[in-house]
Image (tube, helix red, strand yellow):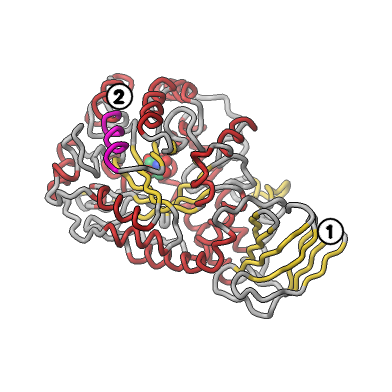
Amino acid sequence: MRNSTTRSVRQSVVLQAVIAALLIGVTVAVATRFKAAGQQQSNQQANQQANQQANQQANQQANQQANQQANQQANQQAGQQTNQPATPPPRPAITTVSPEDAARETNNPRSKWFREAKYGLFIHWGLYAIPAGTWKGQQIPGIGEWIMNRAKVPVKEYEQLAAQFNPVKFNAEEWAQLAQDAGMKYLTITSKHHDGFAMFKSQASKYNIVDATPFKRDPLKELQAACAKRGIKLCFYYSQAQDWHEPNGAGNTWDFGPDDQKDFDQYLRDKALPQVREILTQYGPLGMIWFDTPRLMNEQRAEQFTKMVRELQPDCLINGRLGGKGDYRSTGDNRIPDQVVPGVWEVPATINDTWGYKSYDDHWKQPADIVFKLVDIASKGGNYLLNVGPTAEGVIPQPSQDILRKVGQWLKVNGEAVYGAGPTPFGQEFGKLSETKKDQRGQPVFEQAKEWRVTTKPGRLYIHLFTWPKEFALEGLKGKVTKAYLLADSKALKFSQSEGKLVVQLPDKAPGELASVIRLDVSGVNP
Ligand code: FHN
């Protein structure tokens, strides 16, 4: 099992690296900003590999039915191997969905705001921001919030961080303002991550930010007010299964032994369920609860959470990593599907290579890369949940802020083509796996077809150009184009249309630094 999953992680990493390489190298005429985006993506693949290896079991579980997960875990514990072919096909970024489930997700009134929002801010913040990737002088590989696990820090040692946690520079107004400036419509923050430390006032466990730190404030309360003021949907991440602080929580095998010998239901009863009740009742209406890594979860356990959420906040979404069916699906971390995916889904992604703050991770994705990813995801039908990791002082690193604000400026001009927009009616722009070309690991190369993406609204097509050609040509367009213009300046563009081929004449220079968007008004048939 370990070998096969490692292989599939490698394959996914390779596939993503190939996509990134092609983003850079499809043509020498590719504009600098597009190249920069691809380069960044390519570099990230290697760095993400270590992180993905640590988490891939959890992600796989999240993408499967609860009882399958239980079987997988049992197999894994027994060290069994699955019968994988020597070179299995690349692992998809997201589980396939039945037409019924896709329709259930899409027609769910509860998910309407989410389907329109498209872009959210993820915040991983907790005690792990203090070590910030270094434990006892050693830089610990992997994602920052996993430091306790990676360095096998005993609970008794790790919990001493609480006495040092005093994020006096935390300012909820500034964080919510950043989300707003960035054009993000929802904010999902870790209320409790796998380390078990609650970032809110909890009666269920004294191991929380109000009772166990000198800070004594409840940042989630403050964020509630700041988000409400700006119309940003507040959402809470909650690690329902892994809790390395608790003897019966999943994941801490170095203090408490193997997970299969724990009374996991007791942990759920004593901590996870009561705390989820607390976050559902103390912070006003929530956009969603974002569960994660459903180790040891099964349908019956998941149902206890689902029931509670539905009873206490019927409008609150449940993400796809609880352990049963959620309201929508998550892709693997940083995994963007190759093609349009039906239903409702989201790509959780890092802005550098970690979720929780690491003092030495400055591998920032650039604004052009983020705009490309946001549009690419929207054109395939999904949402982009982009993470920042604040410091132990409560500051969102300045590079993250600058990058997000730059993308926000782009959205101010071009947001019409993103918020509430549907996927492309085409698909030929995405590309495909090469039948002949292989990368150095022997995996098929993903060949990027075009440097543009399409999003839609009724009667409209939005063409996002990541390079700047002299003219834009599009085949296979149904309906008659009545008007074409750039969102950046609203000036009419000349175009011709015959036999299904549209050609739009473009000015010599792109109107902006990042992607430029042509709006096409189309009559006769919905594009
Ligand atoms: O293990 C976690 C990880 O720390 C992080 O929270 C990500 C975000 O999607 N989820 C898990 C791994 O997939």
Which residue is tagged 1? 500
Q: Residue furthest right?
A: 499
Q: Residue at x 32, y 50 (%)?
A: 356
Find residue 112 and report its horizontal and vertical position in percent.
52, 44
Q: Residue at x 43, y 62 (%)?
A: 182
Q: Is residue 367 left or right of residue 212?
A: right
- Tag 2, which secondary structure? loop
Find residue 306 and report its horizontal and vertical position in percent.
41, 28
Q: Is residue 74 left or right of residue 162?
A: right
Q: Viewer-nearest of labels 2 and 1? A: 1
101 vs 6, nearest the viewer = 101
Q: Which residues are magenta?
A: 273-283
Crowd band around label 1 with a 10 angstrom C-alpha radius: few (<14), some (14–19), many (20+):
few
Q: Is residue 277 magenta?
A: yes
Q: Is residue 362 magenta?
A: no
274 vs 226, nearest the viewer = 226
Q: Is residue 459 visible?
A: yes
Which residue is tagged 2? 258
Crowd band around label 2 with a 10 angstrom C-alpha radius: few (<14), some (14–19), many (20+):
some
Q: Is residue 221 left or right of residue 213?
A: right
Q: Amino acid at mark 1?
A: Gly
Residue 364 position by quadrant: bottom left
- Tag 1, which secondary structure? loop
146 vs 328, nearest the viewer = 328
* Label 2–label 1 contact, CB within 8 A: no
Q: Is residue 147 left or right of residue 523?
A: left
